[in-house]
């Protein structure tokens, strides 16, 4: 074979460092982005945060509930749909609904200085601390106190004693001579503590302890006590016919006992468990401007970055240092600022495209959600489908109906009789409405729900109904039946 030299032109995609950084920043959540920027700020002296001027407060999205609807404050603003009106403090009626409920949002700096400092909530005691505090107030002998304290340490987070007394007794040294009867007595002392039902060895005993603490004249107490001790499995299976036969009671008495049991707490220790707080920062704020839904970037989620002018002037004055480390850091800072800006612009474009297609959802709720896939948004904006997937992951939109992840607005579809399609989210909302309005004595089965939806032109199989019902955490028909 003869060797020859040939010239060939071809195109291929090369992931430059700038493009790699842009992709990485795009898939980060707002909290992760701030952590990444803090790392860049610590490593690059030419990059700094732009300090907000005095009085220039960014609007903050309240995270403790759904934002207030914006229909009244934005209808008469006079701004164009593609250019949201600026907030004017001089207009009494033009109140920014994102600032409502913020402490000191409407006062001056002097008012804040003269006002009272906020009271910080004390840390709630744990279940162990709560029980040991009660134990310290008792007049029990020291040996009994130590046994009760050992049982307290053996409780799980729900307040149950899941470990047998024999195993707990074996944990003590042999010279202590701890007997099973002593632990049983100590357990009775523990079960008299607050919360009622703590120290139980199962749901039956937990409910029975709470029922025993009620006055004897409580309606339905005796039947509920027998039901909790001996027939709790039948109650969970809603086998009311067999319960009536075993308890020798009528429907009214059984209904009273059932309501009494449902009012009890099967997890008495859960109130003292640690609460995990999750904070969500909305990337996009949805407002209605002149009957048009407009998606705007949340200024509170947008970091303000800039080039450090002192170092930049030094580098410009010393042109010979253009190839130094400082010049490389200047270029890196410029890339980062550009990529962060491009990230938020892409989020805003994708969010607006979603809002344009799901405007009926914001007007009428989940039942008006239309089918939407990533490919539809990607084709409309000229983006790759993977880019839209990165944009919609862990990015949140604050709307008058609540705060939603952008992926929430995407979903599969089900065909209708008319040849159209219905969103899976809308079908779940319809199922929820049907179950909420059903007769508790004759609840709707999955087949019946499928039949009702079919009468509305939505063709859904029974298995699909069951899958959607389980995703909504709605129990099956036999567990929804009541007296």
Image (spheres, rainbow, N blue to C red):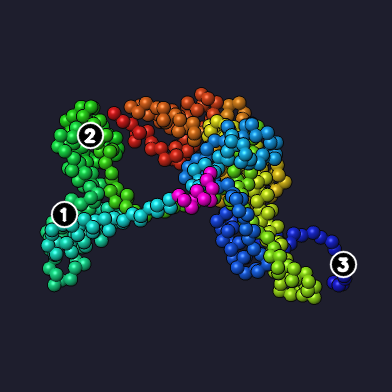
* Residue at the spot 63% in from the left edge and 47% down from the top edge: 297
Q: Nearer the viewer, residue 270 or 208?
A: 270
**Closer to the N terminus: mark 3 or mark 1?**
3
Q: Position of residue 219 (x, y in %)?
A: 19, 32
- The stretch drawn in magenta includes residue 110: yes
> Quarter holding the N terminus?
bottom right
What is the spatial separation of the Cα atoms under label 3 and label 2, in whole angstroms? 91 Å
Mark 3 touches mark 1? (CB < 8 Å): no
* Residue at the spot 21% in from the left edge and 67% down from the top edge: 171
* Residue at the spot 65% in from the left edge and 68% down from the top edge: 44
**Highlighted range, magenta:** 105-115
- The stretch drawn in magenta includes residue 337: no
Q: Is residue 137 above or below residue 448?
A: below
The residue pinned by badge 1 equals 189
> Quarter holding the C terminus?
top left
Q: Answer yes or no: is residue 388 visible.
A: no
């Amino acid at each position: 074979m003869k060797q020859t030299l040939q010239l060939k032109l071809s195109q291929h995609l090369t992931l430059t460092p700038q493009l790699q950084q842009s992709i990485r920043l795009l898939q980060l959540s707002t909290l992760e982005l701030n952590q990444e920027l803090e790392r860049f700020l610590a490593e690059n002296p030419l990059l700094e945060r732009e300090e907000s001027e005095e009085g220039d407060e960014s609007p903050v999205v309240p995270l403790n509930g759904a934002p207030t609807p914006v229909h009244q404050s934005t209808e008469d603003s006079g701004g164009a749909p593609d250019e949201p009106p600026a907030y004017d403090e001089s207009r009494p009626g033009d109140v920014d609904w994102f600032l409502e409920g913020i402490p000191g949002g409407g006062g001056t700096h002097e008012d804040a200085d003269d006002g009272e400092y906020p009271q910080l909530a004390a840390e709630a005691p744990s279940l162990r601390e709560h029980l040991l505090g009660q134990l310290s107030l008792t007049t029990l002998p020291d040996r009994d106190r130590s046994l009760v304290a050992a049982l307290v340490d053996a409780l799980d987070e729900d307040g149950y004693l899941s470990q047998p007394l024999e195993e707990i007794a074996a944990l003590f040294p042999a010279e202590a001579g701890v007997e099973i009867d002593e632990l049983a007595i100590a357990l009775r002392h523990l079960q008299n503590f607050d919360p009622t039902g703590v120290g139980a060895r199962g749901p039956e005993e937990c409910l029975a302890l709470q029922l025993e603490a009620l006055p004897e004249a409580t309606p339905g107490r005796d039947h509920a006590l027998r039901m909790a001790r001996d027939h709790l499995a039948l109650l969970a299976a809603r086998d009311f016919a067999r319960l009536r036969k075993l308890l020798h009671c009528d429907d009214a008495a059984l209904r009273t006992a059932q309501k009494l049991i449902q009012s009890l707490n099967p997890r008495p220790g859960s109130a003292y468990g640690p609460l995990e707080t999750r904070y969500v920062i909305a990337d996009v704020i949805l407002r209605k401007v002149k009957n048009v839904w407009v998606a705007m970037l949340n200024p509170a989620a947008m970091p303000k970055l800039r080039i450090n002018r002192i170092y930049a002037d030094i580098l410009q004055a010393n042109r010979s240092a253009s190839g130094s480390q400082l010049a490389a850091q200047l270029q890196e800072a410029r890339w980062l600022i550009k990529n962060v800006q491009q990230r938020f612009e892409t989020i805003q474009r994708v969010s607006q495209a979603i809002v344009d297609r799901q405007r009926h959802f914001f007007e009428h709720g989940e039942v008006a959600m239309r089918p939407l896939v990533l490919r539809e948004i990607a084709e409309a904006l000229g983006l790759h489908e993977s880019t839209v997937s990165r944009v919609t992951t862990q990015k949140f939109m604050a709307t008058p109906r609540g705060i939603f992840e952008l992926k929430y607005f995407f979903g599969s579809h089900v065909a209708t009789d008319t040849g159209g399609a219905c969103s899976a989210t809308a079908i779940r909302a319809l199922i929820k409405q049907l179950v909420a309005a059903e007769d508790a004595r004759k609840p709707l089965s999955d087949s019946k729900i499928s039949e009702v939806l079919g009468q509305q032109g939505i063709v859904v199989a029974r298995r699909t109904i069951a899958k959607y019902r389980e995703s909504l955490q709605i129990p099956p028909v036999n567990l929804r039946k009541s007296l």
